[in-house]
Amino acid sequence: MKNIAILIFDDITVLDFTGPFEVFSQAKRNNDINIFTVAEELNPIYSNGNLSINPNYCFSNCPKPDILIIPGGVGTRREMDNTRLIAWIKSMHNEVEQLLSVCSGALLLAKADLLEGLKVTTHHNVFDLLENIVPSSTIVERNKRYIDNGKIIISAGVSAGIDMSLYVVEKIFGRDRALETASGMEYDWNEITVN
């Protein structure tokens, strides 16, 4: 079974986390995926549209994830300065098999010093900010839906997180599972050749 954790925080973009959540929920067969949300504290989180979300876990009681997803949203600008959250992401990088980001979640990976020497992408409105905070060895790709750097896989904005998640389902469980998942969602998977 794969434990898949999705970090949530105030002012998160809803589809950034619900898109991947739906993909991995649809991809589950015989309880081989356990997907859950995690926040810094066990308090309701409010999205950018004021949707109230109750996290399943907080940092102190979260099961060890195999995959950690870092979504984006305007809240990432505030969370970039949240030393506890950034330290948690950095510590999780050492524990997980895969670390994924959606949209401006890449900003949090940059603040955790995890993007050195990688090719990355983000939402088109965040390219300049990301370029200003990554090391000079990091290449910001402005025309990619998602980029596979091995352990770290990064997607562009919002719906690109669904495409990336289907790609990860294919990597772990095979192409047939990914295609069945996309079909079950009635989603037109935007497959690309990744780096």
Image: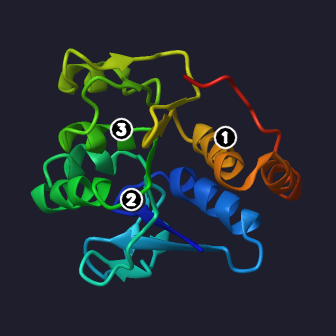
Query: Foreground residue, 150 or 13?
Result: 150
Instruction: Using a 10 Å C-alpha cutoff, classify the residue at mark 3 as few (fewer than 14 neighbours), some (14 to 19) or many (20 or more).
Output: many
Q: Are marks 3 and 2 in contact (CB under 8 Å)?
A: no
Query: Foreground residue, 29 or 60?
Result: 29
The residue where tag 1 is placed is 163
| Residue 141: image location, x then y, percent | 45, 17
The residue where tag 2 is placed is 96
The residue depicted at 11 percent of the width and 56 percent of the height is: 83
Question: Which amino acid does the dot numbered 3 rest on?
Answer: Ala
Q: How many marks?
A: 3
Where 30 falls versus 67 (above or below)?
A: below
Look at discs 3 and 2 and give the one toward the viewer: 2
Q: Which of the image's four quarters has the C terminus?
A: top right
Instruction: Using a 10 Å C-alpha cutoff, classify the residue at mark 2 as few (fewer than 14 neighbours), some (14 to 19) or many (20 or more).
Output: some
| Residue 145: image location, x then y, percent | 59, 28
| Residue 66: image location, x then y, percent | 46, 64
Residue 23 disc label:
none
Question: Which amino acid does the dot numbered 1 rest on?
Answer: Asp
Circle 3 SS class: helix
The residue where tag 3 is placed is 106
Instruction: Using a 10 Å C-alpha cutoff, classify the residue at mark 1 as few (fewer than 14 neighbours), some (14 to 19) or many (20 or more).
Output: many
Look at discs 1 and 2 and give the one toward the viewer: 2
Q: Which color mode does the image show?
A: rainbow
Circle 1 SS class: helix
The residue depicted at 54 percent of the width and 15 percent of the height is: 143
* Left/right of residue 178 with respect to residue 17 in the rendered view: right
Which of disc 2 and disc 1 is earlier in sequence?
Answer: 2
Question: Which amino acid does the dot numbered 2 rest on?
Answer: Val
Where 114 falls versus 180 (above or below)?
A: above
